[in-house]
Amino acid sequence: MRAKYFASLLLILVTALCLLSGYMNSSLAGAQAATLLKGQAKGTLQILPKSVSKQMHPSITRAGAWSAIPTTTSFYEATTDAHTMYAQGCQAARGVAGLLILDWGQPVYLGNGSYGTYNFGGHAASDTAIFHAVANFVLGVWSCRTSATNIAVAIGESNYYSGNAIPLTQAAWYADGLQWGNLVNNVASFVANNHYSNIGIYGAGDLETGWNTFALTSSMVNGYNNASSHIYFDFGDDAPGNWTNAQVWYVAYGARDNLPLPEIYFNADAIYDWEALNIWACTHAGGPMYIRGVMATVIGNTPAQAWTAMYNAESGNSCTAKTSSWLTFSTYIR
């Protein structure tokens, strides 16, 4: 009797362990599926505030280039002057629909818990001053709007550092990202409260692998993501040899609200950097990144060439080709 009792007890225990193992495996599979679904969900978000009648996806010609892809103008900001910012917004309102970046430069700690940037005019500007500058940009967009005005504005800073600008600690960079997220939230609230229905507001970072460590850059990204739920566009590079693939993937896509808007100044940036990373993501991160657009500048590729290089690179692989139809934005920064 005792032997039968222990045999029955052992059978019950084994059955329970099997059920528990199955539950844990299904839970882990469910969690992974939820993570992948979240990545796809953010990758396919409608970025523009107004829907478009048809997808803003140009067709590639037989020559492999599309010469007239709609391209917005992004700005390396040199001043917070109200008139300058208003004029930039007015210009944007009369331009094509799309995503643009307002880049305010490198982070700076101003003391007393306050952060800002050194802008491209060489001046320190607090996050408060940047908020007012972007608000004036928004007013310019609204005042000069047409029936076709439909733009998304991403407010950006870089991960560049110098020893005197901001302490080289993860706590300081996290705090900077946290305040940047609050800045984006405040601008978005300003837009929503005034019913400026043709303007979307997001965050952004010129995250260059050669400018900073992954530890400090990811701290800034994590601070932003903990403060804001607005998409954060990485408009930096993927230069090889500085960070691991997993690290570049994290700040471009793996972090909760991050999406790539890579610099494709030369075709090699698309083929050997970003597409190579995206193929890595297919194998090691559960699926491809949704690259929503590209950035060009005065050197190298034109905006159309940059877009075409990225589109062709994505289309050449069966995994990344699944996301190529979401490559819908092109911007030129000056």
Image: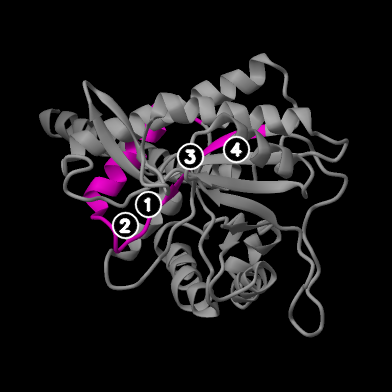
**114 or 236: nearer the viewer:** 114
Relative to 50, is 303 above or below?
A: below
Q: CA distance from mark 2 to mark 1?
A: 5 Å
Between discs 1 and 4, the one toward the N terminus: 4
* Residue kind at label 1, given as amino acid type: Tyr
How is the rendered protein coloured? one colour
Residue indicated by mark 3: 79
Residue position marked by numbered label 4 in the rendering: 84
Three-letter amino acid code at the position of disc 2: Gln
**Quadrant of image for the C terminus:** bottom right
Secondary structure at badge 3 equals loop
Q: Residue 28's quadrant in the figure?
A: top left
Residue 226: quarter of image: top left
Q: Residue at x 40, y 66 (%)?
A: 238
What is the x, y in percent for residue 123?
A: 36, 41
Q: Nearer the viewer, mark 2 or mark 4?
A: 4
Residue 247, label in figure: 2
Residue placed under numbered mark 1 in the picture: 250
Q: Residue furthest top?
A: 193
